[in-house]
Image (cartoon, grey):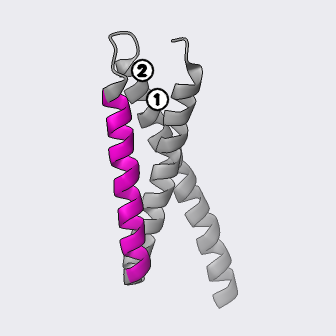
Amino acid sequence: MENYWIYLIYFGAGVLQDIVITLYYQLISKKRAGLTAFFSFFITLINLTILYGILSNLTPDSGILLIATYALGNAVGAYLAVKFSKISDKRTIGHIN
């Protein structure tokens, strides 16, 4: 566990990925084809890069910890995306009334 920065990178990537996926789903619902295609490309790039990185760095000591750190980042990203979405919805609703 000497390279703590790698855990921070995987955590950050998990957060980023979930935020980007939330934006992707919002674009799908708004039928924005060009941006949806771009986000689909970006999400696939993130997913495969992370998968490659985790599989390349698997060791008996750090493998599960890397996966758990990434999963925790995904959970935090999902939480932040939903919280941000609720704030955004409240602002939009306030402007409509």
How far across and down, in percent of the image, does residue 94 sit? Answer: 68, 81
Residue at point 52%, 27% (across, down):
6
Kindly identify the residue that appears in the image at 34 percent across and 55 percent down: 44
Say if 61 sits above or below 52 in the image: above
Q: Is residue 53 above or below residue 36?
A: above
Which residue is drawn at the image coordinates 32% and 10% (left, top)? 60
In percent of the image, x 39 and y 74: which residue is there? 36
Within the image, what quadrant is residue 54 found in?
top left
Q: Main secondary structure of the magenta part?
A: helix
* Residue 42, x across and y down, in percent: 41, 60
> Circle 2 — which element?
helix
Magenta region, residue range:
34-55
* Residue 97 in view: no
Q: Is residue 92 visible?
A: yes
Left or right of residue 67, residue 93 in this image: right
Q: Classify the position of the C terminus by image quarter.
A: bottom right
Residue identifier under label 1: 69
Report which residue position mark 2 lands on. 65
Q: Is residue 53 magenta?
A: yes
| Amino acid at pointer 1 | Thr
Which quarter of the figure has residue 86?
bottom right
Q: In the image, 97: left or right of 69?
A: right
Label number found at residue 41: none
What is the distance, in whole Å, between disc 2 and disc 1 at their CAs? 6 Å
> Are the two marked residues, 2 and 1, in contact with CB atoms closer than 8 angstroms?
yes
* 40 w.r.t. 76: above or below: below
Mark 2: which amino acid? Leu
